[in-house]
Amino acid sequence: MISAGPMFLTMVIKDYLLQQPSLPSPAVRVINATELAPYITDLEGGTWHRSDAQVVMWIGRRPWTWFLMGAIGLAAGLSIFHRVLMLILDRVLRKAESSHSNPKLAKAS
């Protein structure tokens, strides 16, 4: 929504025009909506006007949220990896112990 498309164009033009004391030439101007009507059609999808856009904008205004979500994901991933690795190692060690056990001791007990 912000990196491409009409919102990006609107922000760039607004920033450019706000820096200018006046419009630099007649070639740069704000076009009236009636002049654009033959070229632009509104399909009324409106997906970027619903709650999903509000969530994206909320996260975009808070960069620490991305960091926190990444840190939590990394910690959870490392924890799961550690548990799986320990389970595999435990099974390998038990198998090694059972294959190396002394058959005479097993009969005596």
Image (cartoon, helix red, strand yellow):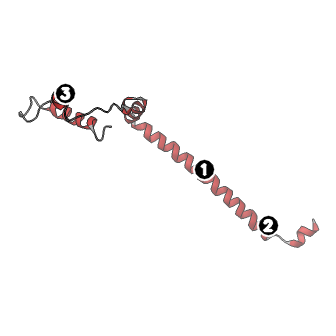
Question: Looking at the image, which residue sits at the far front?
Answer: 38
How many marks overall? 3
Name which of mark 1 and mark 3 comes first in the sequence: 3
Structural crowding at the residue carrying mark 2, measured as other residues with C-alpha within 10 Å and reported as few (<14), some (14–19) or many (≥20): few
Q: CA distance from mark 3 to mark 2?
A: 82 Å
- Across and down, in percent, residue 57 comes to 37, 33
**Which residue, given by chain and number where applicable, does mark 2 sit on?**
98
Quick one: quadrant of the C terminus?
bottom right
Q: Of label 2 and label 1, which has the lower sequence position?
A: 1
Front position in the image: 55 or 27: 27
Counting other residues with Cα less than 10 Å from the Cα at mark 1, is it few (<14), some (14-19), or many (20 or more)? few
Disc number placed over residue 33 in the picture, else none: 3
What residue appears at the point 19 percent right and 27 percent down from the top-left corner?
33
Vertical side of 34 occupied by 80: above or below: below
Measure how far apart labels 2 and 1 are at the Cα level. 27 Å
Residue located at (75% from left, 63% from top): 94
36 versus 67 height, above or below? above
In the image, 2 versus 76, the foreground residue is: 2
Circles 3 and 2: CB distance less than 8 Å?
A: no
Between marks 1 and 3, how big is the CA–CA gap? 56 Å
Compared with residue 70, is residue 54 higher up or lower down, i.e. above or below? above
Residue 80: image tag: 1
Answer yes or no: do the residues labelled 1 and 3 have beta carbons within 8 Å? no
- Please indicate whether residue 86 sits to the left or right of residue 62 in the image: right
Element type at mark 1: helix
Q: Point out the image quarter for the N terminus.
A: top left
| Residue at 94% over, 68% down | 108
Mark 2: secondary structure: helix
**Front of the two marks 1 and 3:** 3
